Amino acid sequence: MSEALPLIVGFGGFNAAGRSSSHQAFRRMVLESLPVDEQNKTIASLACLMGYVKADGEMFCDDDLTGLSLSRVVEKYRTAVIEGTLVRKIENFDPSQVPGNKKITFDEGQSQHFTMLKRDLPKAIPADWCVSEANDGVVEVKTSSASEYLVTSNYELAAKAAGQLPTGFNLAGHYNSRFHPRGLQMTLLGASDAIHSLGIPWEVVAGKVNPDQVGVYSSSVFGQVTEEGNGGLLQARLRGDRTTAKQLALGLNTMPADFINAYVLGSVGHTEAITGACASFLYVLQAAVRDIRSGRRRVAIVGNAEAPVTPECSEGFSNMSALASDENLCKIDGSDTPNWRKASRPFGENCGFTLAEGTQYIVLMDDLLAMELGADVHGAVPEVFINADGVKKSISAPGAGNYICFAKAVAAAVSIIGKEGVQKHSFVHAHGSSTPANRVTESEVISRVANTFGIEDWPVTAIKSYVGHSISAASGDQLIAALGTFKHGLIPGIKTISSVASDVFQDGLKFPLTDLDVSSKSMQVAFINSKGFGGNNATAVVLSAEKANAMLANRHGDGFPEYLKKREKTRLEASKYAAQADVAELNVIYRFGEALIDEAAVQISETGMFIPGFECEIEFNLENTWQDMQKTD
């Protein structure tokens, strides 16, 4: 048999549009194009996630403890839900009054005289300070030496828009968060959402494979930059605070994978944390696809979580002139007031990207395991290509690498579904960062490839216009949205722009500015493209569920009808979770404090190992694949 086909059998996560599983976030993005009942369902489920209402049987209740029907919830909270999702003004902190310090300097000979509490004196008193007792625990300090002091002084961010999780969505309230950094809270919620979406208990999945045939592929680019991680670690002494025992360990960018292994799956299998700037999701996806195709892994949890909406990250990107500042947004619009809702404008007249937070995870299985378990197939990822740029003038500048990975992805899709299939039944999820450089360079790549393969009116969308740029999770946002298109037959339009910029390459391309109905075209493949800092370019080929199922039927023939029967139960169980999640009962998996593996009970033989708590053994690979290179007697 040829290589295994990596199938997407579960997906979950959260971004500025809401929850990924059962396409809640996708439905928010195309809300106005949905039937009224789907719109109402989406609004009500988001109202629950955002804490406006709670479910009470067939009714809802809010803080007034008043019973509300679905229609009443929609009537009462529709505006709040719409305004509290997607890109908007930063809410996690006040971007106009960010706490900071101003350094003031006194030259030699300038007299300084102040009083302070004795208990606040530094342990090592500066040699040039003259300290004398005053009264009631107060001391006087005099000095005339050159000195520097920090005084509290708030400052204002240049860019005040961000793609944040929905207003009121309290991550820590869904499990015992134990002061976890925000990015790791998002990891646990995102991975749990993906696993529950399977419709198959994880214990059943794990019981069908060897422990080392499970893989977790996950990372974050920045690590954990909030107070509980590296943010607090690096700032504590400068602020006069102390570091904690957790900040260093929890700040590592490998922690998303570690948390999933330790607290979600309890896995002893393969773990891999790769980063590639803005293309990081596709980096970990390629690793998982590689291992499933080769047979090394049979099931994989793949994804990223990033929480970079902090003053420091915002200021760093702003100083690179990378973010859409309030001032530049006003210049583009000819207005005195920045339009934060439309801060991210891919392929339009733009001035920088919009920082965002997000967490996205998918579950991959090989086709044999999916058939055996009756897993529901949402799509397939046969190929992911990654290429660098070569010599660069600037580490942030684009280069030739994206030409290679994108063209190879299209060529690979042609080999799988045929040239006509790509020409008529494919679309592109562009990186679409919303910078002036990206709109030109990426559109040129896509246009030249379109012309090479004879593609006309190729739909190109960019969902950073909805959710901003979540860095390591950005390509995950794109992939999850592509699954939504396969399900609902709608490609989200780039609604934050009124027209495509004049310098954008459009030959062979179609940039929809409103939602594009493709239900009659039976889309078979999506291309997920990413252009990251440093020359981290990647493109993934994602096949639709319809195409993947057709491939399964061709390969497995007589076994396919039996698989369809098993799938009915899986879909029923998945729908039960979807109903719970729609009322914000997320059932986050957090296995802290459970019994550890008894290492003394591990059994080792020459052919394998038995690990307590796992049904299957680990088998040693005894095949010598270099036999032809060795002498024989």
Image (cartoon, helix red, strand yellow):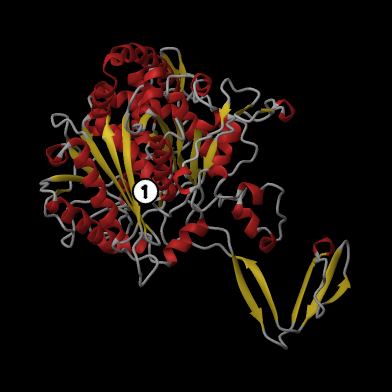
Answer with the quarter of the image where residue 428 lies: top left
Q: Is residue 545 above or below residue 153?
A: above
Decide which of 184, 604 is in the foreground and name it: 604
Q: What residue is at 63 percent from the left and 22 percent from the top?
A: 613
Image x and y of residue 254, in percent: 55, 47
Give the side of residue 103 with respect to residue 395, left or right.
right
Decide which of 510, 202 is in the foreground and name it: 202
Please, what is the three-letter code of the amino acid marked with disc 1? Gly
Q: What residue is at 41 percent from the left and 48 percent from the top?
A: 283
Quadrant placement of the N terminus: top left
Q: Secondary structure at mark 1?
A: loop
Q: What residue is at 35 percent from the left and 64 percent from the top?
A: 327
Give the side of residue 230 with respect to residue 126, left or right.
left
Image x and y of residue 264, in percent: 56, 30
Decide which of 187, 212 is in the foreground and name it: 212
Image x and y of residue 302, in percent: 44, 38
Decide which of 540, 603 is in the foreground and name it: 603
Q: Is residue 315 above or below residue 109?
A: above
Give the mark count. 1
How busy is the neighbourhood of tag 1: few (under 14 within 10 Å), some, or many (20 plus)? many
The residue that label 1 is drawn on is 468
Q: In the orientation shown, which residue stands out farthest toward the bottom?
A: 109
Image x and y of residue 483, in percent: 30, 33
Q: From this viewpoint, is residue 459 visible?
A: yes
Q: From this viewpoint, is residue 174 visible?
A: no
